[in-house]
Image (spheres, helix red, strand yellow):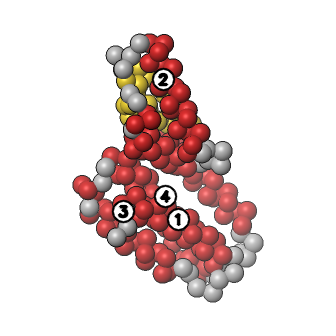
Amino acid sequence: MATIDEELGQLERDIRQLKIEYDQYFGGGRKRPPTEIEWRIDMLVKRYAERGGELKFAQRFRFNNLSQTYAKYKDIFRKKVALKEEGKVQRHFGAAAKLIEAERLKKEAEEHAAHPQAFRMTCSAPEREADKVEQLYEAFLQAKLLAGEHTGKLSRSSFNEFVLKKTKELQKQKNCKEVEYVVETVEGQVKLKALVKS
C-alpha cells in the first residue's frame, strides 16, 4: 500500500506527464487525448479531497497546490480540445500556447501574491527533525513551482544543510531555542524567512 507522500509524488508526476501528452496530442503527435492518465488523476484528486482530514498540514498544502495546478491545466486542455474539435487549431500553435500559459501562470502568481498562503514551521534541532525540514522543503518547492520560478538548482541536501546552518547560527547569535521558518510569496517572488522565537 503506497503512503500518502508516495501517492502525492505520483500525482505530481502524472500531472506533469499529462501536460506532456496533451502537448503531443495538440501538436499532432498523438491520435487521442490521454484520457487514461486523466482518469487516474481525477480519482486521486477526488479521493484526497474527501480524505482531507487525514493529511498532515504539509501534505494538505502540497495537495492543494497540485489540485490547483491540475484544475488550471484541465481548463486550458478543455478549451483547446473544443477548438481542435471545431477545427480552429492551427498546427503551429506552440509559441501561442506558451504565451497563453505564461500569461496564465503570471496571473496565477499575482493572485497568489495577493492572497499568499504562508507556510510556517518551527524547529530547534533540524538534524533530529527530518520530517519538519522535509515539509519545509516541499512547501518551498511547491511555492516556487506555483510562482513559475525555476527549481532546477534547488536540491534537498543543500536545503537541509542551509536549514541546519541557519538554525545553529541564529541560536548562537540570538541565544534562542527555536527558529521559525516562513515560506511566503511576495509580489510573485517566493521568500524563505528565518525568524527567531523567543
**Residue at image location 36% in from the left, 62% down from the top:** 3
**Residue at image location 36% in from the left, 20% down from the top:** 177
Closer to us: mark 1 or mark 4? 1
Report the residue marked by disc 4.
Answer: 69
Q: Nearer the viewer, residue 189 or 54?
A: 54
| Measured Cα–Cα span from mark 1 to mark 2 | 35 Å
Q: Amino acid at mark 1?
A: Arg
Closer to us: mark 1 or mark 2? 2
In the drawing, what numbered circle is on residue 3? 3
Mark 1 is surrounded, within 10 Å at the Cα level, by few (under 14), some (14 to 19) or many (20 or more) other residues, namely few
Mark 2 is surrounded, within 10 Å at the Cα level, by few (under 14), some (14 to 19) or many (20 or more) other residues, namely some
Q: Secondary structure at mark 3?
A: loop
Quick one: label 2 or label 4, which is nearer the N terminus? 4
Q: Please tell me in which quadrant of the rendered image residue 133 appears.
A: top left
Quick one: label 1 or label 4, which is nearer the N terminus? 1
Closer to us: mark 3 or mark 1? 3
Residue 168, percent from left and from top: 48, 23
**Res 152 seen here:** yes
Q: Amino acid at mark 4?
A: Thr
Q: Nearer the viewer, residue 77 or 61?
A: 61
Side (left or right) of 149 relative to 122? right
Report the residue marked by disc 1.
Answer: 13
Q: Secondary structure at mark 4?
A: helix
Q: Amino acid at mark 3?
A: Thr
Q: Amino acid at mark 2?
A: Lys
Among all residues in the image, which is located at the extreme left? 53
